[in-house]
Amino acid sequence: MTENGLEWINCVGVTTDGAAVMTGKHSGVIQRIKNLSPNAVSCHCFIHRAALAAKELGEGLHEVMMN
């Protein structure tokens, strides 16, 4: 961000896959970004959520989700 002249305060959103290193309450990347840009919101990537859901579907629906 700094190298490209971008300001953290302009960051309005962060999307992650939910990994602990990204979402840790005290030292995760999201918390660090929110410290620099308090109005930034975070969400779990919808593609990753779909992949997680597909693991629990029946075989037929799993095939549809994966294609």
Image (cartoon, rainbow, N blue to C red):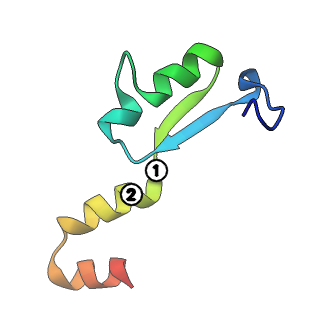
Residue 66 lies, with reference to residue 23, above or below; the image says below
The residue indicated by pointer 1 is 45
Q: Nearer the viewer, residue 45 or 33?
A: 33
- Mark 2 crowdedness (10 Å alpha carbons): few <14, some 14-19, many ≥20: few
Residue 44 is left or right of residue 61, and the answer is right
Q: Quadrant of the N terminus?
A: top right
Report helix, strand or loop for mark 2.
Answer: helix
How many marks can you see? 2
Where in the figure is residue 5, as x and y percent of width and height? 84, 32
Residue 55 is left or right of residue 6, and the answer is left
Q: Which mark is residue 48?
A: 2
Please indicate, yes or no, whether residue 38 appears anywhere in the rendered image.
no
The quadrant holding residue 4 is top right
Report helix, strand or loop for mark 1.
Answer: loop
- Please state which amino acid type lies under the numbered disc 2: His
Residue 60 lies, with reference to residue 4, above or below; the image says below
Residue 38 is left or right of residue 59, and the answer is right
Residue in view at x 51 percent, y 33 percent = 42
Q: Nearer the viewer, residue 66 or 9?
A: 9
- Please state which amino acid type lies under the numbered disc 1: Cys
The quadrant holding residue 54 is bottom left
Q: Which mark is residue 17?
A: none
Residue in view at x 25 percent, y 79 percent = 61
Residue 41 is left or right of residue 47, and the answer is right
Q: Nearer the viewer, residue 55 or 60?
A: 55
Residue in view at x 62 percent, y 26 percent = 40
Please indicate, yes or no, whether residue 66 appears anywhere in the rendered image.
yes
Q: Are marks 2 and 1 in contact (CB under 8 Å)?
A: yes
